[in-house]
Each structure stands twice: as C-alpha cells, then as structure tokens.
Amino acid sequence: MEEKDFVQLVRPNIAALTPYSSARHEFTGHADIYLDANENPFSHHRWNRYPDPFQSALKNKLIEIKKCAVDEIFIGNGSDEAIDLLIRIFCEPGVDQIVTVEPTYGMYRVAADINNVAVNRQTLNPDYSLDIDTVLAHTTSADKILFLCSPNNPTGNAIDADVLLRGIKGFHGIVVIDEAYIDFSSQPSMIQYIESCPNLVILQTFSKAWGLAGLRMGMAFGPAWIIRLMNAVKPPYNINSYSQEIALQSLSKLEEVQDEIATIIEGRNQLRDFLVNHPSVLEVYPSDANFLLFKCIGAKSLFEYLRTEGIVIRDRSNVVLCEDCLRLTVGSPEENKIFIERMNNYNQ
Ligand SMILES: *Cc1c(COP(=O)(O)O)cnc(C)c1O
C-alpha cells in the first residue's frame, strides 16, 4: 500500500481542518521589536514571550542524532499527547477501533476510551513474543491503528525487527511502534523505516533514558504527511519555552546520557543475577529496558514487604499473562544495593 491509501484513513473533519494560526506561526523570522502577539514587553518576567510552536531549535538538533528530517518529527507534551493525537486523527469515535497486544502500556487503551474508540485487544504469546500473523488475522477494516511496544512495557522484551516489519507491511492502517525504552535495547530503532513505510510512526520520549520525565516531552517520528496532521491538531503552544531549552541542552550532553544508560544496563544485569538466585523468585524475564519483570511466590506479599521497607516497585500481578509478576525499575547503584539487602532479609 502507498501513502495515498493511508491518507484515506484520516477522519474527514481532520482532513478538512484549517489549523489555528498564531502570531508565532505567521512570523518566524527575526525582528527588532515584536508587537504582534499581545505579550507583556517587560523581559524581566523571563517567560514573557510565547514559545516556538514548531520547536525548531530542538528539532534541528534532533535530526543530527535521529538521522531524519525536521518535517518527520513531532514533539508532544509527553508521548501521551502523541498517542491521543494519533487516535483523534485516525479514529472516528463510536465507529473505528485501535488494536493493542496485551500485556502492554496502558495509555493506548485509556486514550482510546477517552475518545470513545473501541479497543481490539489481542494478546502476546505466553513467552511474550509476538505472533504478528495471528494478530493481523484478527483485525478488521474498523481497526485504524495498531500499537506495538518494543521493548514492551511491562514485559521488557524487544520484538524482532523482521516481525515488526511484517506488521508494518501487513497492516492496512497506521502502525505505531512505541520505543520509549529503545535506548536501553540491544535492538536498533525502527526510525530508519519511516522513509519507506508511509504508515509507520515511532514514539520515543525524553522521560526515560534522557532523564526528563518531569518536563513532559515525547517525540514522534513519521512520514511528513502524518507529522503535518499531528502539528495541525496539537494545541499551538504545546511545549513551553523552558522545556524546549532544557531538552535542547540535554541533547548536547549525549556522552553523559550514554554513561548513565551503560550504568543502568549494568545495574539491570546485576539485579537479574541477584533475582534469579533468590528463593522467592520463580522467573526473571529477559529485558531490553530499564526494568525487570519477574515472577515470584506470592507477589502481593513481597510487594507489601518491600513497601514497609520503604521501597516501592510495581505490582503487575493482575495484568493478563503476568500472574504473580512484579516490575522493578533499575535504580542508581546505591538504590540497587539497598534493594538487594532488603530482599535478602525477606523470608516469605
Ligand atoms: C514511560 C513510557 C512512555 C513515556 O511516556 P511520556 O508520556 O513520554 O512520559 C511511553 N510509552 C511507554 C511504553 C512507556 O513505558
């Protein structure tokens, strides 16, 4: 299928939309005096000017790192915003559906529910691998977006590139691959495929490896025709000036971030080695992310014990295919050491 086939999937009201055009949309050059946006002229307020609605400085730096073009990048108020926008662009409420493969990140379902868009819920194999052919066989023409998460949250495993590619080529709608944890993975990003796949959107985030969860900054990479729609539907000034500045600064500290990632991966391996030998742990699942999912004897009691010891991890035991499973985020070396000590004092 080609771009023009996927363009047909856009909701008619979105295809016909005339986006809001602000002062900063209409004048992007440099002037001596700005009297066009009704701002307070006194710059001692520091934040008196509206932010760049296109986040140009940030995108111009990102293209060096991500090897794509400026018009293939969307910046959102967290990945959450990108997920919500994609659903609003492609899914007619009460008519269309999204496809999720469970267990996975909960926001796809929540964003669909909020938009009155039904969810076609498929499941991973019991070993958390993805049977893409079976998933595709269970889709209908009402399914507009297929969400795949790799490395997957909460299971931690990455999906093989050839399986993802079969999904992208085989699905009649938009395929969103959520790569929130890609920086911790041994697998490369799928960004390189946005040039040749007109229905592919990749989600990444500043919240995990980049350490900026508090700023709320998500990235989407995709073909220009989809990015254009996302920019048309987003609130005009969705990313504030402060966040744009800090994110830009962090992009020039690539080496520091790389060192932190290496330390986190080292911590992940240490925690894995510890957990596999712990008497209460039955299985530690392979992880390409900054967390470990493990199955244990009495997940709820272990969770409560750690809670009383001042350590909070995530109870995933009520999630499909995750019975008696807990999810542990890799902390700093010091935090991991304390976790190990307190786990050693646990007798179920
Ligand atoms: C943490 C996470 C995100 C990041 O969401 P933000 O809104 O960018 O903070 C996205 N997808 C998955 C699967 C995650 O686990």
Image: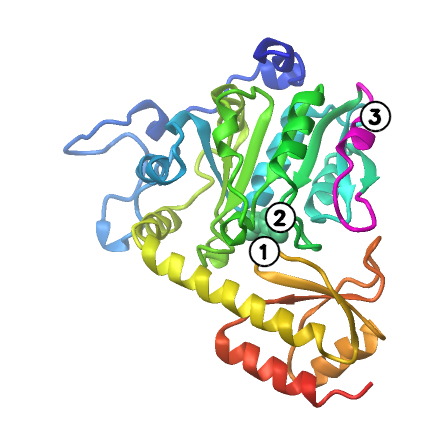
Predominant SS along the magenta part: loop
Quarter assignment of residue 99: top right
Image disc number at residue 137 = 3
Q: Where is residue 22 in the image (x, y as percent from the top left)?
A: 39, 28
Which quadrant of the figure contains the N terminus? top right
In the image: residue 300, left or right of residue 237: right
Circle 2 SS class: loop
- Disc marking residue 89: none
Residue at 29%, 50% (x, y): give it: 252
Q: Mark 1 points at which residue?
A: 289
Q: Is residue 41 above or below residue 30?
A: below
Q: Measuring 65% from the left and 42% from the top, which residue is drawn there?
A: 159
Q: In this view, does 134 lie above or below 241?
A: above
Query: Where residue 169 sits in the image (x, y, percent)?
Result: 66, 22
Q: How crowded is mark 3: few (under 14 residues within 10 Å), some or many (20 or more)?
A: few
Question: Which of the two discs, 2 and 3, labels the residue nearer the N terminus?
Answer: 3
Residue named by callout 2: 151
- What type is the residue that disc 2 sits on? Pro
Q: Nearer the viewer, residue 240 or 39?
A: 240
Place of residue 244 in the rendered image (x, y in percent of width and height, measured from the top left):
37, 46
